[in-house]
Image (tube, grey):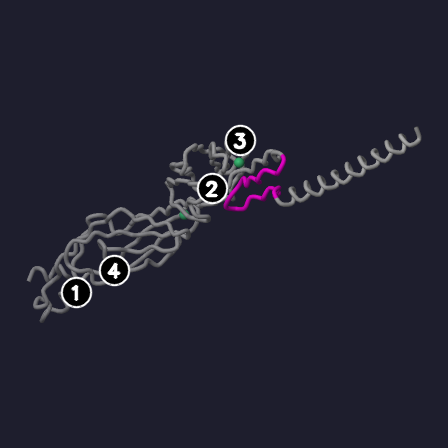
Amino acid sequence: MAGLFQVSKTIGFRRLWITGLLGAWMVTFAGNASAVNCQPYATPSTTSSDTVSPKCGGGDPPPPPNYPPIVSITSPANNASFTAPANVSVTASATDSDGVAKVDFFDGATLVGTDTVAPYSVALANLATGTHTFTARATDNKGASATSAAVSILVDAAPAVSITSPVNNASFTAPADVSLTASATDSDGTVAKVEFYDGATFLGQGTASGSNYFLTWSNASVGSHAITAKATDNSGSVTTSGTINLTVNPGIPNWHRRGLQSDCDRRSQCRQL
Ligand SMILES: [Ca+2]
Ligand SMILES: [Ca+2]
């Protein structure tokens, strides 16, 4: 009986020893398999998302986390300036390995449009003057979302300008020094300069006095002239005034002046010669 117990005890010990050895081997194997085959989930970079790890030996890994889309506004450029009335298209790039369901566009906190098809954009018409700050929020097919960096633009009010002197259809006699006056203002800034043109020909820049700008156009040539004033504000917006038409008529022939210089100071008398 004692011998039988001794044999049974020996077999039990061997079984225990073998089981322990097998267990240790399995732990070692599993540890090696995990180190070799089970890579951790990679963190998404700025150019890709949703990196999926390979399956571990002996079973599927837990489902990968759903990373949100990568989204950025590609147009307009940050700090771009527009002149009112401004029509601006805001365009965004959005990517996600699950698929992008939609991109929402915001002007400040206000939702101004949604696009579900790339390229993602929204057309904004007649934007109010002032600063607009746009963001794009992309949502993937699993409901994860991300918001782009903000892009700000300025919508500038163009200056107002008109020619106040001379009047339209005024006529002059050569040699004529024509005094040009324009009035220019800017509702959301300042007038940087006012320039006068005869058709496409630059005549000169006006001298400012308050909101009035003056230029003496010396020795204007005989003929018809179409005068405009072009105002530029501090944001670079430009407005061209309405056109003032002038006529410069031929002056008194020189031979009329000879021998009657004093009378020729009065042009009407010279014409009677
Ligand atoms: Ca995703
Ligand atoms: Ca302005």
Q: Nearer the viewer, residue 35 or 153?
A: 35
Question: What whole-number distance in Å separates the C-alpha atoms at marks 4 and 3?
Answer: 71 Å
Q: With 229 as the anchor, is 251 left or right in this view?
A: left
Note whether 140 is above or below 31 in the view shown: above
The disc at residue 265 is 1
Mark 1 against mark 3, which lies toward the viewer? 3
Q: Amino acid at mark 1?
A: Asp
Q: Residue at x 49, y 38 (%)?
A: 96
Quadrant of the rendered image containing residue 187: top left
Q: Which residues are magenta?
A: 37-58
Categorize mark 2 by other alpha carbons within 10 Å: few (<14), some (14-19), many (20+): some
Categorize mark 4 by other alpha carbons within 10 Å: few (<14), some (14-19), many (20+): some
Question: What whole-number distance in Å separates the C-alpha atoms at marks 1 and 3?
Answer: 92 Å
**Residue designated by label 3:** 142
Mark 4 against mark 2, which lies toward the viewer? 2
Q: Residue at x 55, y 34 (%)?
A: 144
Q: Is mark 2 within 8 Å of ligand 2?
A: no
**Residue designated by label 2:** 132
Q: Is mark 3 within 8 Å of ligand 1?
A: yes
**Residue designated by label 4:** 217
Q: Amino acid at mark 4?
A: Trp
